[in-house]
Amino acid sequence: MILNHWLTTSLAASMLYMVPGCESVVSPTPASLKSHDYKVIGFFGGGPWRYERMTHVIPGFLAFDGEGHLAEWDLADIVTEAHAHGVKVVVSFDGEHWQENFLPMSDNADGSRDRFLEQLRIFCIDQDIDGVDYDWEIGGGFSPEQQKLYSDLVIETVKIMRPLGKTVSIDAYFRDEINAEAIEAIDWLQLMSYVDMDEMKQMIAYWEARGVPREKMMLGMAGGWGPNGEGVDQELARAKTRHVIDGGYGGVMIFRTDLDPENEQSMLWTVDRTFNE
């Protein structure tokens, strides 16, 4: 994730990117909310859980090593609470340290990818996880070899997860990250465009030219703007949500919900109001 530097400092201390000290807030889901068919996917970085305006939540990044071993992460309480609110839980894999984990694992030279996928299968079944998301980012773009490795990983993940009723998605920028076969395989693609509508439209055109149908695109928006790294752009959030409706896209992705105000100035409120107009 382009803004995921907020998590990198914990890598040295732990393999697990679990968000500590999360405050849980349980409240009935208002009947007027989530009455649309669009996905509202929230990357979560701390603070209270706000399920009532999301359809999917990504609670953070699950770490693993280059040999394909997953870190331990107990998501049972989060999954139970999210499901009680009708929200699906997707576990994501951080792309910041791709040379340390994604690359050596994905080449499968020593069976590391097979090991990773088997552990992931067990993890998702045991914890009732609804989907897997890959955020493999490489500065400067992907080489043909890296694109093939990433695509093969995505395709093999789909082969394992789809029979279990679980989704597979990736986070994408202006790069040929996966090939046509992997594009066909994934359930959706989350566009990491956070600047303005011009950038968003350029990114959409980039991926449409590579064969991604509109219903597979989730338009990204982000908190954390401004001189103090806080705040949101409600006008941009509304414009992107309207673009989803008018253009027939799959939904929106919000990075990160903990930087989104818990009032009517929030992106979640703006997205929800716009979808329900």
Image (spheres, grey):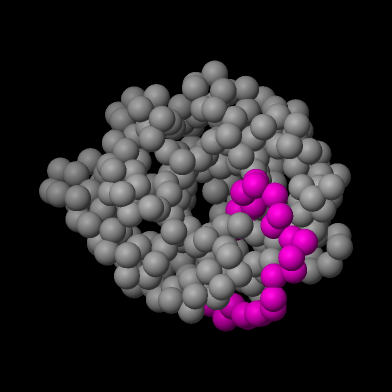
In x, y percent, where is residue 87?
57, 63
Q: Position of residue 266 (x, y in %)?
A: 80, 59
Judge whether 116 appears above or below 209 on screen: below
The magenta stretch spans residue 6? no
Question: Relative to the observer, which residue lies in front, 197 or 5?
Answer: 197
What range is drawn magenta here? Answer: 19-43
Instruction: Tell me the residue at 61%/39% (across/down).
Output: 250
Quadrant of residue 124 in the image?
bottom left
Relative to 58, 167 lies left or right: left
Q: How many marks?
A: 0
Q: Is residue 1 left or right of residue 141?
A: right
Q: Position of residue 109 (x, y in %)?
A: 15, 43
- Magenta span: chief secondary structure: loop
Q: Position of residue 2 (x, y in %)?
A: 58, 46
Q: Residue at x 19, y 50 (%)?
A: 114
Q: Could one spot residue 257 in this view of the protein?
A: yes
Q: Residue at x 60, y 69 (%)?
A: 85
The structure residue drawn at horizontal position 65% and vertical position 59%, both measured from the top left corner, is 54
The answer to which of 228 and 242 lies nearer the viewer is 242
User: Does the segment drawn in magenta span residue 28?
Assistant: yes
Question: Which residue of the protein is positioned furthest toward the top in this rendering?
Answer: 209
The correct choice, above or below, for 219 with respect to 132 in the image is above
* Residue 229, visible in the rendered structure: no
The image quarter in which residue 75 lies:
bottom left
Name the side, left or right, on which 74 lies relative to 264. Answer: left
Q: Is residue 199 left or right of residue 163?
A: right
